[in-house]
Amino acid sequence: MKKPSWQLDFDCKACGACCRAVGCPLLDDATNLCTVYEDRPDWCRVGYLRPKDFPVDRYLELTHEACKILEAQWATV
């Protein structure tokens, strides 16, 4: 799957917190990875969610802040 040109790669720790927070049934609790990771929908791809005109630095800053909050509540690793 080719990502849109304005989107970016996101450095995911694969802790599983965001998947747990939304109740994803495809999360493998043993590995903290999605069982369809390579074929997951675009809305599961953090880097694909950045609005086209939203500054990359600010998007990454906010996303990392959100990750910390989710990790504090949901991460198991």
Image (cartoon, grey):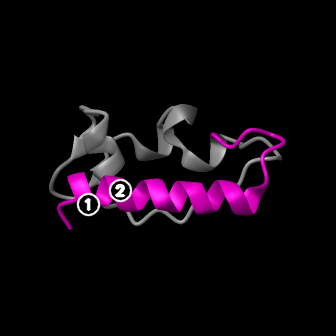
| x and y percentages locating residue 36 in the rendered image | 38, 40
Residue at mark 2 to residue at mark 1: CA–CA distance:
5 Å
Q: Amino acid at mark 1?
A: Ala
| Residue that appears at 48% across and 60% down | 65
The vertical placement of 57 against 6, above or below, is: below
Q: Secondary structure at mark 2?
A: helix
The vertical placement of 45 against 71, above or below, is: above
Q: Which mark is residue 22?
A: none
In this rendering, position of residue 76 left or right of residue 54:
left
21 magenta-colored: no
Q: Secondary structure at mark 1?
A: helix
What residue does disc 2 label? 69
| Residue that appears at 78% across and 46% down | 54
| x and y percentages locating residue 43 in the rendered image | 53, 33
| Residue that appears at 74% across and 38% down | 51
The quadrant in which residue 10 appears is bottom right
What residue does disc 1 label? 72
Q: Nearer the viewer, residue 3 or 47?
A: 47
In this rendering, position of residue 44 left or right of residue 3:
left
Q: Are marks 2 and 1 in contact (CB under 8 Å)?
A: yes
Q: Amino acid at mark 2?
A: Ile
Magenta segment main secondary structure: helix
Q: Which image quarter is the N terminus in?
A: top right
Start-end of magenta stretch: 49-77
Mark 2 neighbour class, 10 Å CA radius: few under 14, some 14 to 19, many 20 or more: some
